Amino acid sequence: MNRISLNQITTKGWSLPEAVRGCAEAGVPAIGLWRDKVEEVGVGVAAKLVREAGLAVSSLCRGGFLTAEGPDAHRAALADNLRALEDAAELGTDTLVMVVGGVPEGSRDLAGARERVADRLAELAPYAGDLGVRLAIEPLHPMFCADRAVVSTLGQALDLAEPHPVGQVGVVVDSYHVWWDPDLAAQIARAGARIASYQVCDWTLPLPADVLLGRGHVGDGCIDFGALTEMVTAAGYTGWIETEIFNQEIWDAPGARTLATVVERHRAHVESA
Amino acid sequence: MNRISLNQITTKGWSLPEAVRGCAEAGVPAIGLWRDKVEEVGVGVAAKLVREAGLAVSSLCRGGFLTAEGPDAHRAALADNLRALEDAAELGTDTLVMVVGGVPEGSRDLAGARERVADRLAELAPYAGDLGVRLAIEPLHPMFCADRAVVSTLGQALDLAEPHPVGQVGVVVDSYHVWWDPDLAAQIARAGARIASYQVCDWTLPLPADVLLGRGHVGDGCIDFGALTEMVTAAGYTGWIETEIFNQEIWDAPGARTLATVVERHRAHVESA
């Protein structure tokens, strides 16, 4: 239980104060925060609540959305990410999860969108370094390439990270997004100290009408968490392991019950690896 | 129009005789056949119909399903694929599209499923060579990894193909399945003479409840067919270009109207490249 963290989207029905209390009561030592939940109470109050509860903040979700075109969108994206970096620092986490954005609507220029991600990461990285927060590039499953993230594999995320100091730009290994990758073992080994976050949830079938919400509790699907956790551990990662689940049915369940399942599955499938 | 082919799943409401007649009337010189449609009339009759209509058969869909475990499933898969190879030869096509199968239900052993694919391809390849038919491994989009195909990238398909003679095992480049791949340009160049089939349809949003049916007409989504067709051409591929669309709305439209749209989009987005 010393590395488990609740990504608070998993208990979406809980406010930030409720999630903090829930973690404390369940003996979960860390929480991954979401900006919308933080903003409901204000970043200062949120920081105070987690500190007083004795919780670590494993990450802040999320920055990114770097692919929009034009000077206005560019400026807005930079401003928003700078705010997110400042919030992360104030909340006491060194990890800002970056969902980089999809192909702009009406565009067919995937390569161009990917170039903008690289360019804007280069602008942001020094600021991240100044604040002691790392930009953690999250490759999303390729089914989200068009609308959410043009970074689709761990290898691609590492290609984007490598021009920058390891303390400024890292990567997220999220089981749901990467489990299918034939090159996964090699890329996790390559990632090494670039791994800024390890997130878990399972691939379950059938996919729901909104594929964003298809994720299951660890152990309910076809991902081998033993093998994956061994790879991440062998690469040298010793940080938090966040359970992050998007699933309407799980969101509709009471938060405490969801968190109890998260803890139980973490013990059975992840911690035991 | 000299390289266009209708993959008959695109006009799912048409029987094989109707699809053959539709292609002839529309001036489409080739057709990709599906085994279930062939079996409705029998392989001999199907071969005669396409020959008499003056159509080429660009491919037969499909063999595969090689990942099931146990001796019974193994024997059944081999027998079925041998039959498919014989049917392909009788129908006059040199290309059997292989959808290799997903992770067996209840299993978490993705690596094992992938090993079985390699082993069973090695068993089948010499028979394919004897019949003058090529096993065309189709990487499917990673969202189908669990339930349809554990081959998820063109690079992985090439790794599986390369131990075998180029005339026995090739790969399919299907725009829908590969467009997102950050390594696509390099892998298409690497594929060269291994490219056995080039299939097109577009990635459109939102994904429907059954993601199998989310494909759109060429030009309706975010895939750059100019760039993709140039890559495939530069790799040396001069064969048929099949339009293959799974989409309930398109299936509900009259076949002739669908085929007219296929032809128009092929001219505007693919042939012009």
Image (spheres, coloured by chain):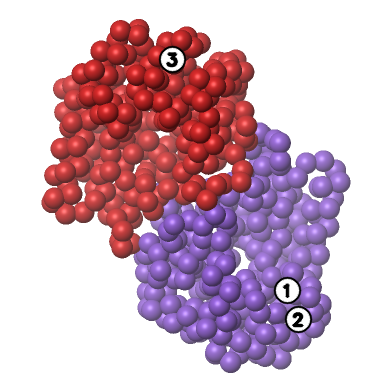
Chain colours: A purple, B red
The residue wearing badge 1 is A37
Please tell me in which quadrant of the rendered image residue B155 appears. Answer: top left
The residue under label 1 is which amino acid type? Lys
The residue under label 2 is which amino acid type? Ala
Relative to A167, B156 lies left or right: left
Residue A165 location in percent, x, y? Answer: 65, 58
Q: Alpha-carbon neighbours of circle 1 within 10 Å: few (<14), some, or many (≥20)?
A: some
Q: Mark 2 or mark 1: which is in front?
A: 1
* The label number, if any, that marks residue A46 in the structure image: 2
Q: Is residue B78 visible?
A: yes
* The label number, if any, that marks residue B23 in the structure image: 3
Residue drawn 48% across the image and 48% down it: B210
In this view, the residue in front, A247 or B70, is A247
Q: How far apart are marks 2 and 1 (CA)?
A: 9 Å
The residue under label 3 is which amino acid type? Cys
Q: Mark 1 or mark 3: which is in front?
A: 3
